[in-house]
Structures are given as structure tokens and as C-alpha cells.
Image (spheres, helix red, strand yellow):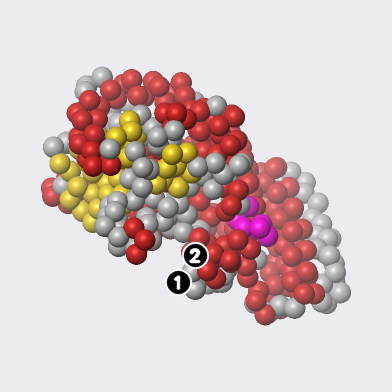
């Protein structure tokens, strides 16, 4: 492949794909191995001089083009092989590493991803972008894309391991949240006390596990999401819903494309809408329940995105909502799809493109939340809403509303484009610069 001039003065011949999976896989592996050899001969990212950075960037870009060409020809066949003809249900991270092993050169291997994980975002080679191209191709296929989306509705292994204890005790605590069952209501309380419930890889894992447990428990009729009391100096003793993505972790390179940015959309947020796949569920294959979100103080970024996936939103009168995509530089998940459906394109543009903050007392807030109450009445409003949503016909009707509001095919098409756009944004110069400034402002803490 033509990777541009490198230190050795060599250039690569772009492999000519024939349409044969076996032949094309061999050609891809050989070309990719040459790029790996180049990268291995260079210093690690932060130690490269400008010429070395340019050589690496050119080689990575050209390999990305070749991988994209391979996926355009073989994405469905690759997915079939990785899933045993769609009989198996690997999760996102399992899928990319299985692809790296089964088709050498198609995706970065586990070892290279682990090494890149140790680097700050600005010093990485952007290997996750290649994962973005992979998921763009898989989700872009109607046949295999729907299979992947359905696979992500199955309970996580972690949830299944905890299920018996949860059913017995009705209470469990994770690192970033607490889950408790009270009178048929599963209360999921975010407890990232010092970081204002900022989202990171751990919170995404904990949230999906907790949502699975609540959905799989027959004694739970309704789920509630709310932030706990903070120990952060500026909000000590106050409840906070969510401050959005943890920008310090983003600066440090600890925000995962697969396990955070993609998983949150196809995992717990999708399950809040569509439910969880259960082996004994009949006649429906999923178990879904109504969800309430109670917003104290603010719901920023990913926190606001949660509101688009639930059935009833209660906001304290002094709370606000925002999607600071213009400031952070990334795509705010499914908000472009869901906020537009809820509030219309004009308001969606003001919030997402213009950074408009919406206060709960503004008329436009009624397009986002269902009740605005005195801050001291949020708890009581939650109890009242849970009683209303616990009725026997609520589940059937919410299912039909969600089907009308966001058909599975619309979700798949959006997810395919999101998978690529978010991967590219994650390594864009403006995102890295802004995250770096945020990390410096926080002293790297």
C-alpha cells in the first residue's frame, strides 16, 4: 500500500483485492504487517520527532483505507465467521478482538490496544479509529447489523453472575452506583460523589449491569435513575444527576471508544428503551419496564442523553440540561436522533450546535421533562410517578410508543454512522486540545 515516504525510504504496493476472502485476507495481513513493522521501528508516540510522526500518520491512514476497502467487500462474511453464522452473540469488545485474531491485519490486536491504552489521548496512534470503521461496516449491513444490536440486548455476564444475590437481597453496591429494590421499584442511584457522576468506562459497565438486574427481576415493576448527594466542594451535600463525560479521563486516554462511547449507546441506553433479552421470555423475547429519571441540579452531556431513553422525567425547578458537544467536540451519542424527534430540529440545533443550556423553568424544558417540581419535592414526585407507571398496561403501551418513535431500522442506520463519526472525532485535533486544557486546569487529577 502507498503509505508515503518513511524513514527507510520504502513504499508499499496497495494490495489488489480479488473478492476472495482467503486471498484478500492474506494480502491484507501482509500489508498490515509492514505498517506494524514501521511503527515498531519508531519510538513511542510522545518521543517521535515531527518527521517520525508524519511517517506514522501516513502509514496508519493508508492502512485504514485498505482495511475499509476490505470491509466493503467482506464485512458480512467476516461477521458470519466470527459469530458462527450468527448463532453466537459476542459483545463489542469480544467481537473486535476475535476479528483481530481470526483476520490478522484487519483490526489492532489486544496487545497493541493495551499498549495504546497506557498513553495520553494526544500521544496515541488512534487505533480505535480502525475499530470505528469495522463497526460502521457491520452496523451498516441490515442483516448483520440488526444481529449485533440484538446481541447487545442480552444481559452481561457480570449481571448474570450477580442475579441470584440481587434477587435475594434487593440491594447491591457497585463502585459508581447503588441499586436497591423498594416496594417493586428499583432505585438506581449514581454515587460518583467527588466527580459529579461524570461518565467513565467503569460507570458504563456498572450502569448496564444495574439495568440488567432491574429488568430481570420479576419483583421490579418500575426503575428510577437519580443522582446521589455529592462530596465535591462546590456541590457538597446536594444531589447531582450527571456532569457528562469525564474529560480528565479523556485527556489521559482512559475513555474507551468500544467500552464507553459505543457500548453506552448499544448497551444500557438501548436496554432502557427496548429491554433485555431473556431466555425464558415469551411471547416477547425481551423484558422491558418503564423508567423514571429524576434530575437534581443538572443533567449535562451523557446525563441529558439518558433522559431521551426513559418514560418519565422529573426535574427540580432549579435544574438545567445541556449537551456541550460544541465545547467537547464529540458527537453526543444518540441525542442528534432522539432530541430532534422529541423537540424538533430547531431546538436540537440550538442545544447541540449552539451549546444552549435549557433551564427546567423555561417553556422549552417541557419538551424534555414531564414534571418540574420544587427541589424538596423531587423524591415525592418520584414515588407518585412510580405508582402511576406501575399499572399493568403501561409496559405494552410504552413498547408501542417506542416502536413508533424509534424503529429498529432507524436506530441501526444512525448507529452505523455514529460508530464512524465518533471514532474520528475522538482523535480530532480540537477534541485532544480541549481535553488537554481541561486536564491542565484540573492539574491532571
For the C terminus, the quadrant is bottom left
Q: State yes or no: residue 430 in magenta.
A: yes
Precedes in sequence: disc 1 or disc 2: 2
**Helix, strand or loop at mark 1:** loop
Which of the pair 427/4 is nearer the observer?
Answer: 427
Is residue 189 found inside the magenta-colored segment of the image?
no
Tell me if 20 is positioned left or right of 362 in this view. right
For label 2, the SS is: helix
Main SS, magenta region, reads helix
Dot 1 crowding, Cα within 10 Å, few <14, some 14–19, many 20+: few
Instruction: Count neighbours of disc 2 (C-alpha within 10 A) and say few if under 14, some if 14 to 19, many if 20 or more.
Output: many
Give how far across and how far down residue 384 sits, in percent.
20, 30
- 3 shown above or below 204: below
Provide the residue designation for mark 1.
445
Splitting the image into 4 quarters, where does residue 212 fall?
top left
Q: Is residue 392 above or below residue 110?
A: above
The part of the chain drawn in magenta is 425-431
Point out residue 430 in the picture as x, y percentages from the top left corner.
Answer: 66, 58
- Coordinates of residue 383 in the picture (x, y in percent): 20, 34
Which residue corresponds to the image point at 36% horizontal and 24% vertical from the top-left? 399
Q: Is residue 320 above or below residue 261?
A: above
Task: Look at the image and tell me in which quarter the N terminus lies.
Answer: bottom right
Evaluate whether residue 59 shows in this view.
yes
Q: Are marks 1 and 2 in contact (CB under 8 Å)?
A: yes
Q: CA distance from mark 1 to mark 2?
A: 7 Å
Q: Is residue 208 left or right of residue 127?
A: left
Residue at the image point whose x is 42% and y is 42% from the top: 320
Residue 98 visible: no
Residue topped by disc 2: 248
Which is more toward the observer, 432 or 61? Answer: 432
The residue depicted at 28 percent of the width and 42 percent of the height is: 375
Amino acid at each position: 500500500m502507498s503509505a508515503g515516504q518513511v524513514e527507510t525510504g520504502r513504499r508499499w504496493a496497495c494490495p489488489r483485492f480479488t473478492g476472495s476472502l482467503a486471498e484478500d485476507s492474506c494480502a491484507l495481513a501482509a500489508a498490515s504487517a509492514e505498517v506494524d513493522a514501521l511503527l515498531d521501528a519508531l519510538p513511542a508516540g510522545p518521543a517521535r520527532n515531527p518527521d517520525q510522526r508524519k511517517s506514522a500518520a501516513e502509514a496508519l491512514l493508508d492502512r485504514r483505507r485498505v482495511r475499509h476497502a476490505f470491509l466493503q467487500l467482506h464485512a458480512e462474511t467476516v461477521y458470519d465467521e466470527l459469530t458462527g453464522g450468527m448463532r453466537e452473540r459476542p459483545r463489542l469488545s469480544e467481537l473486535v478482538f476475535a476479528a483481530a485474531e481470526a483476520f490478522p491485519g484487519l483490526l489492532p490486536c489486544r496487545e497493541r490496544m493495551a499498549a495504546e491504552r497506557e498513553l495520553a489521548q494526544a500521544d496515541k496512534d488512534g487505533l480505535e479509529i480502525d475499530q470505528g470503521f469495522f463497526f460502521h461496516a457491520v452496523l451498516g449491513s441490515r442483516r448483520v447489523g440488526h444481529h449485533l444490536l440484538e446481541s447487545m440486548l442480552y444481559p452481561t455476564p457480570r449481571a448474570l453472575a450477580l442475579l441470584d444475590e440481587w434477587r435475594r437481597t434487593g440491594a447491591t453496591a457497585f463502585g459508581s452506583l447503588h441499586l436497591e429494590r423498594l416496594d417493586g421499584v428499583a432505585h438506581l442511584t449514581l454515587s460518583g460523589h467527588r466527580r459529579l457522576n461524570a461518565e467513565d468506562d467503569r460507570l458504563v459497565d456498572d450502569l448496564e449491569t444495574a439495568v440488567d438486574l432491574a429488568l430481570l427481576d420479576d419483583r421490579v415493576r418500575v426503575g428510577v435513575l437519580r443522582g446521589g448527594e455529592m462530596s465535591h466542594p462546590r456541590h457538597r451535600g446536594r444531589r447531582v444527576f450527571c456532569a457528562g463525560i469525564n474529560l480528565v479521563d479523556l485527556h489521559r486516554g482512559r475513555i474507551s471508544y468500544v467500552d464507553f462511547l459505543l457500548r453506552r449507546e448499544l448497551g444500557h441506553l438501548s436496554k432502557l428503551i427496548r429491554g433485555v433479552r431473556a431466555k425464558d421470555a415469551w411471547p416477547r423475547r425481551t423484558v422491558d419496564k418503564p423508567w423514571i429519571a429524576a434530575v437534581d441540579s443538572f443533567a449535562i452531556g451523557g446525563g441529558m442523553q439518558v433522559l431521551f431513553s426513559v418514560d418519565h422525567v422529573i426535574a427540580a425547578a432549579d435544574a438545567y440540561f445541556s449537551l456541550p458537544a460544541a465545547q467537547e467536540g464529540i458527537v453526543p451519542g444518540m441525542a442528534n436522533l432522539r432530541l430532534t424527534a422529541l423537540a424538533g430540529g430547531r431546538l436540537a440545533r440550538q442545544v447541540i450546535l449552539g451549546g444552549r443550556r435549557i433551564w427546567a423553568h423555561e417553556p422549552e424544558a417541557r419538551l424534555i421533562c414531564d414534571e418540574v417540581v420544587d427541589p424538596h419535592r423531587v423524591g415525592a414526585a418520584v414515588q407518585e410517578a412510580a405508582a402511576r407507571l406501575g399499572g399493568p398496561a403501561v409496559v405494552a403501551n410504552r413498547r408501542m410508543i417506542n416502536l413508533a418513535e424509534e424503529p429498529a431500522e432507524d436506530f441501526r442506520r444512525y448507529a452505523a454512522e455514529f460508530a464512524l463519526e465518533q471514532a474520528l472525532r475522538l482523535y480530532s485535533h480540537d477534541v485532544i486540545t480541549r481535553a488537554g486544557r481541561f486536564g491542565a486546569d484540573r492539574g491532571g487529577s
